[in-house]
Image (cartoon, rainbow, N blue to C red):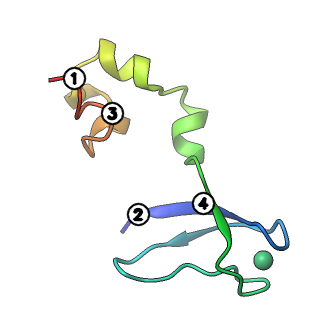
């Protein structure tokens, strides 16, 4: 299951949570469903960007393992 980071629009609480299919994510602090989905800290910290994926085989780029940014490269 993927872990996603969110920031609550209502109280600015930032949190990460496991997201199951079809499950509504709510703020653990105030229960709001008004959330901003944040970019994964792993992707940002490693400097792995879409451009990096284009220069490397998908197999060697962990961030591309899910097929996300390589989907449109043919
Ligand atoms: Zn909140």
Q: Earlier in the sequence, mark 4 or mark 1?
A: 4
Which percent across, then down, holds residue 54?
Answer: 31, 17
Between disc 2 and disc 3, the foreground one is: 3
Q: Secondary structure at mark 3?
A: loop
Q: How far is disc 4 from disc 2 in space, using C-alphas?
A: 10 Å
Q: Secondary structure at mark 4?
A: strand
| Residue pictured at 51% horizontal, 38% vertical | 43
**Quarter-of-image position of residue 20:** bottom left
Instruction: Name the residue beneath numbered marker 4.
Output: 5
For disc 1, the neighbor class at 10 Å (few under 14, some 14 to 19, many from 20) is few
Q: Is mark 2 within 8 Å of ligand 1?
A: no
Instruction: Name the residue beneath numbered marker 1.
Output: 73
Instruction: Name the residue beneath numbered marker 2.
Output: 2
Q: Secondary structure at mark 2?
A: loop
Q: How far is disc 4 from disc 3 in space, using C-alphas?
A: 19 Å
Displayed-image quarter of ligand 1: bottom right
From this viewpoint, which residue is outermost toward the right?
11
Q: How far is disc 1 from disc 3 in space, using C-alphas?
A: 8 Å
Which numbered dot is residue 69? 3
Residues at marks 1 and 3 touching, judged by CB atoms closer than 8 Å: yes
Residue situated in front as seen by the camera: 11 or 34? 34
Which percent across, then down, holds residue 64?
Answer: 31, 35
Which percent across, then down, holds residue 42?
Answer: 54, 43
Between disc 4 and disc 1, the foreground one is: 1
Q: How far is disc 2 from disc 3 in space, using C-alphas?
A: 17 Å
Which numbered dot is residue 37? none
For disc 3, the neighbor class at 10 Å (few under 14, some 14 to 19, many from 20) is some
**Quarter-of-image position of residue 22:** bottom left
Q: How far is disc 4 from disc 1 in space, using C-alphas?
A: 27 Å
Q: Earlier in the sequence, mark 2 or mark 1?
A: 2
From this viewpoint, which residue is outermost toward the bottom?
31
From this viewpoint, which residue is outermost toward the front?
34
């Amino acid at each position: 299951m993927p872990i996603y980071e969110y920031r609550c629009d209502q109280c600015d609480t930032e949190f990460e949570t496991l997201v199951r299919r079809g499950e509504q994510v709510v703020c653990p602090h105030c229960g709001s469903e008004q959330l901003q989905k944040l970019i994964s800290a792993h992707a940002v910290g490693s400097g792995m960007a879409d451009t990096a994926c284009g220069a490397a085989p998908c197999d060697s780029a962990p961030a591309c393992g899910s097929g996300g940014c390589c989907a449109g490269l043919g």
